[in-house]
Amino acid sequence: MAEFLGNMKRTDYCGTLRSADIGRTVTVCGWVQRQRDLGQLIFVDLRDRTGIVQLAFGERTDRAVFDKASSVRSEYVLAATGLVRERSSKNKDIPTGDIEIEVTELRIVGESETPPFEITEKVNTSESIRLKYRYLDLRRPDLQKNILFRHKVTKVTRDYFDENGFIEIETPMLIRSTPEGARDYLVPSRIHKGSFYALPQSPQMYKQLCMVAGFDRYMQIARCFRDEDLRADRQPEFTQIDLEMSFVDMEDVLKIGEGFMARIFKEVLGKEIKLPLPRLTYQQAMEKYGSDKPDTRYGMEITDLSDIVSGCGFSVFANAIANGGSVRCITAKNAAKTLTRKEIDKLTEMVKGIGGKGLAWIRLTKDNTGCSFAKFMKPEEMTAILNRAGAETGDVVLIIADTNTGKVLSQLGSLRIELAKKLNLIPENQFNLLWIVEFPFFEYDEENGEWVAMHHPFTSPLDECLPYLEEDKSKVRAKAYDLVLNGIELASGSIRITNPELQQRMFDLLGMDKETAHRKFGFLMDAFKYGAPPHGGMGLGLDRLVMQLLQAESLRDVVAFPKVQNASELMTSAPADVDEAQLRDLGIAIIPQDK
């Protein structure tokens, strides 16, 4: 039967006691990890968020206390008072292994049924069961360490930005729906029937209005929402370290971002990172790595073979170049043993699965050179390819050709990542940070046949690109930048447009007339009429940052109450039906959908 805690107030956490505490009388509280009843001796491992300490009950223990200790089971909640003493049989596997508590008073303040899984690190239980009982899952030491680590990251974040003159300002959670690239979560209004709020995908508009309002430096650890399909590094609700600065250029924003990352790595991981961080333009990143978020911990950079194979006898290569495309490759060093013909066939299917037409290859072994297209090539052309690719005995060269160079680069980028995993090229405990700058302002949407903003329409184009706005949208680069860590985009930002005329010009180029632009963004455009300072900023994903620093496999390992693949929460069964009265209040009727 559960007892009241009464006057048994905790003096120490379980995992903080050490040999220096021997002789002290302490009170600890926590959950029973396990109980060992040896007849005349009982030992209880008591656990809280700091670790485990052993409680000891023996011949000198009051009989009522001893009997109570005999009755406890796993996950019972206890409060125990006793004398810290040296442990006769030490346990070097835990920090408190040199001591134990000789208990003089014990209270069972909470009983527990048998849990559906054992509360231990790396428990062998399905994730769906653990998420259904997430409150138990969160008791596991490895998950608790992750959440405590996240807490430390947020504390360092607030300290850093406060020291650099930023003001933390909360922005609304119920806002007007504005297009930001993903679906909004909509919230119906009871008072304004037929109208809807949206949950913010980011605080973009409001933080820019904070600059107009004169706050100069804004930051917020902001909750954001996007109704999009989930993956390992994406959740429908996520947390963003959001910042905006006035009277700055891109260099000022990047310097603040770099200083923040250096502070996080030093205080949280105890690692020094070299500043300034490396930079690549978007074009350089795509040309070298086939990705605008490249993982630079390993090589296999992309090589252009187009000039070598232009006009060669292999029509796949020649036609691709003749029609404005290119032929490029990556070289997998010392991979011939792993990349057998069978494995290369699997990689070919992978490339086809992401829109490629196929994969040409050269495989160099001690015995011979295998090649999927050698019969079409002259010996000097083959030699030139191998020299350009830097290929030697034991290497495999993988080549993609297409009339669309963008597709060639992105497919080789995906192939590079797949090969790095297959060949175990990714080093552990290494963190490669870099900036990607000068993103295209526009990207062409082939499905709809129109140019759209790659970031958002408030991003400022580079000054030297202004003449190309109407002439050639493909040449327009933006004052936009991303921070990348080990192949994951951590942050994205830009310098904003504050000139109302230029802003309307950009809207026009995006096919948005004045009436539409004013309907969607009128409040921001009106604000800019009253003296808008030059400003820029970025949003940095807190969840992704913590996930990368911990080298966790999924965001679900660093978020206390995550959603699963179908955006539901297993613990509370959200989303759920609501009753008819609630719908009537909102003026909403559910229309059955055909299955």
Image (cartoon, grey):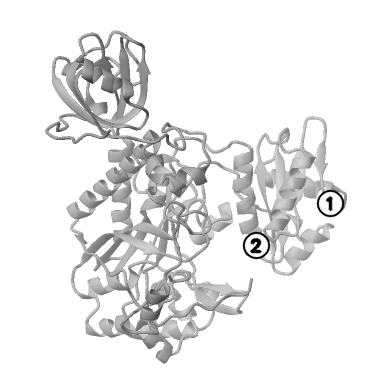
Q: How crowded is mark 2: few (under 14 residues within 10 Å), some or many (20 or more)?
A: some
Assign a secondary structure to mark 1. loop
* Snapshot quadrant of residue 243: bottom left
Question: Could you say which disc has been placed on residue 407 in the image?
Answer: 2
Q: In this view, does 303 lie to the left or right of 577?
A: right
Question: Could you say which disc has been placed on residue 377 in the image?
Answer: 1
Q: Nearer the viewer, mark 1 or mark 2?
A: 2
Residue 186, percent across and down? 41, 73
Quadrant location, the N terminus: top left
Q: Which residue is drawn at 65% across and 37% down?
A: 333
Residue 233, percent across and down? 48, 52
Residue 350, percent across and down? 70, 52
**Distance between mark 1 and mark 2 Cα atoms:** 24 Å
Residue nearest the viewer, comparing 398 with 261: 261
Among all residues in the image, which is located at the extreme right?
375
Residue nearest the viewer, comparing 419 with 478: 419
Q: Residue at x 34, y 15 (%)?
A: 91
Q: Residue at x 82, y 34 (%)?
A: 368
Q: Is residue 439 above or below residue 523?
A: above
Q: How crowded is mark 1: few (under 14 residues within 10 Å), some or many (20 or more)?
A: some
Q: In this view, does 360 lie to the left or right of 30?
A: right
Question: Could you say which disc has been placed on residue 509 in the image?
Answer: none
Q: In this view, does 279 lie to the left or right of 395?
A: left
Q: Is residue 459 above or below residue 243?
A: below
